[in-house]
Image (cartoon, grey):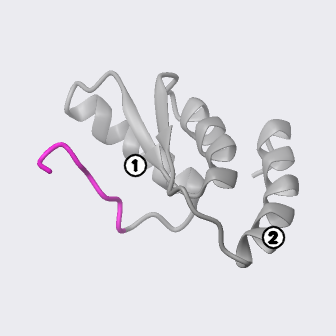
Amino acid sequence: AEALVADSTGRNTRATAEFTAAFAETHDLKRVIAVSQYFHLPRCRLAFAEAGLEDVGASYARYLEWRDIYSIAREVPAVAAYWLGVR
C-alpha cells in the first residue's frame, strides 16, 4: 500500500502524466504503473512518454460497462490528437 500514489489533482491525462513524471524524478523512480480503463491506457502511455516516462506498465479492471461504448468512441479521436501533438 505504501508504494501506491494517487494523483487526486490531475484535471486530465496530460496533467496526471506530468505530475507523475515530476514525482518519479523527485523520488528517483524508474518505472510506474498506470491504472485506468482498458481503452484509456494507450493514451495514458502516450502522455507519460511525452512527459518523459518511457517504462510505464499498465493495469485495468477486468469488467465492461455500458458507458464503455461511448468512452471508446470518445477515446479514438483523443488518441489521434495525442499522436498528432494537439494540445
Residue shown at 88%/55% (left/top)? 77
Residues packed near mark 1 inside 10 Å, few (<14), some (14 to 19) or many (20 plus): some
Q: Which mark is residue 39?
A: none
Please give the residue where the numbered disc 1 appears in the rendered image: 19
**For the residue labelled by badge 1, is the local secondary structure a helix, a strand or a loop?**
helix
> From the viewer's perspective, is 41 left or right of 85?
left
Q: Which quadrant of the structure image shows residue 13?
A: bottom right
Give the spatial CA distance, label 1 vs label 2.
29 Å
Query: What amino acid type should be assigned to the residue bearing mark 2?
Result: Ile
Magenta extent: 1-8
Mark positioned earlier in the residue sequence (1 or 2): 1
Instruction: Please say if 65 is above or below 22.
Output: below
Residues packed near mark 2 inside 10 Å, few (<14), some (14 to 19) or many (20 plus): few
Please identify the residue farthest to the left as the structure is shown: 2
Q: Position of residue 53 (x, y in %)?
A: 48, 28
User: From the viewer's perspective, is the residue at label 1 or at label 2 nearer?
Assistant: 2
Residue shown at 47%/32% (left/top)? 57
> From the viewer's perspective, is 58 left or right of 5?
right
Instruction: Please say if 38 is above or below 51.
Output: below
**For the residue labelled by badge 2, is the local secondary structure a helix, a strand or a loop?**
helix
Please give the residue where the numbered disc 2 appears in the rendered image: 69
Q: Position of residue 73 (x, y in %)?
A: 86, 64
Circle count: 2
Q: Nearer the viewer, residue 44 or 20?
A: 44
Q: Nearer the viewer, residue 53 or 69?
A: 69
> From the viewer's perspective, is 4 left or right of 68?
left
Q: What type of secondary structure mainly makes up the magenta span?
A: loop
Query: What amino acid type should be assigned to the residue bearing mark 1?
Result: Phe
Q: Nearer the viewer, residue 67 or 34?
A: 67
Q: Position of residue 11 (x, y in %)?
A: 52, 68
Q: Position of residue 28 (x, y in %)?
A: 22, 24
Is 36 contained in the magenta span?
A: no
